[in-house]
Structure formats: C-alpha cells, structure tokens
C-alpha cells in the first residue's frame, strides 16, 4: 500500500510503500532530511511528529541490539 507524505518542514511530497495496513515508525524527508515519527492506518496518516536525531539514533541502536539478542538466542 502506498502512503503519501507531505513534509511539515519543507512541504515536499514523498511516498513510500508499506506491506501491512498499519505502520508506526520513523520517516526521513528526502529533501530536507528532517526526521518524523509517522503513524499510518489503512494508508492514511494519523499523526506525524518531529523526531530528534539523537532519539532516532538511540532507537536504531536499541532495535539492532534486540535483533542481535534474538538471533543469538535462536542459534
């Protein structure tokens, strides 16, 4: 399903595809590179909040550590 997003900072139109009807996660504008947290349901954006780079980096590190732990546990 294609989701269309208009950047709150620079008004650039972007789009991306999701496999499920629900998505919650980070989105980076391709033009201004600002980060946002999107909540999407049935192809419609429910919320779009600014996301600080340090918060994004921490969540990315946490997700990588969780994946590594899960992989080690299953091996």
Image (cartoon, rainbow, N blue to C red):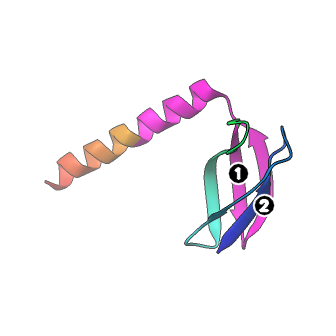
Q: Determine whether, in the image, residue 14 is placed left or right of residue 53.
A: right
The stretch in magenta equals: 35-63
The x and y percentages for residue 64 are 37, 40
Q: Secondary structure at mark 1?
A: strand
Q: Are marks 2 and 1 in contact (CB under 8 Å)?
A: yes
The verdict on residue 47 being magenta is yes
Query: From this viewpoint, which residue is outermost toward the front?
Result: 31
The x and y percentages for residue 75 are 13, 54
Neighbour tally class for label 1: few under 14, some 14-19, many 20 plus, Cα within 10 Å: many
Q: Residue at the spot x=71%, y=62% of the render?
A: 40
Image quarter (top left, top right, bottom left or bottom right) of the N terminus: bottom right
The x and y percentages for residue 71 are 23, 50
In the picture, residue 54 is in which quadrant? top right
| Vertical placement of residue 67 versus 16, above or below | above
Mark sitting earlier along the chain (2/1):
1
| Vertical placement of residue 22 versus 65, above or below | below
Residue beneath disc 2: 45
Disc count in the image?
2
Residue beneath disc 1: 38
Q: Residue at the spot x=72%, y=73% of the render?
A: 42
Query: From this viewpoint, which residue is outermost toward the top?
Result: 54
Q: Determine whether, in the image, residue 52 is placed left or right of residue 59.
A: right
Neighbour tally class for label 2: few under 14, some 14-19, many 20 plus, Cα within 10 Å: some
Q: Nearer the viewer, residue 19 or 22?
A: 19
The x and y percentages for residue 27 are 65, 47
Q: Secondary structure at mark 2?
A: strand
Q: Residue at the spot x=19%, y=46% of the render?
A: 72
């Amino acid at each position: 399903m294609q989701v269309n997003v208009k950047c709150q900072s620079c008004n650039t139109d972007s789009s991306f595809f999701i496999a499920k009807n629900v998505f919650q996660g980070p989105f980076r504008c391709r033009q201004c590179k600002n980060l946002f947290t999107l909540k999407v349901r049935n192809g419609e954006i429910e919320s779009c909040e600014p996301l600080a780079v340090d918060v994004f980096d921490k969540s990315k590190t946490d997700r990588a550590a969780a994946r590594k732990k899960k992989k080690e546990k299953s091996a």
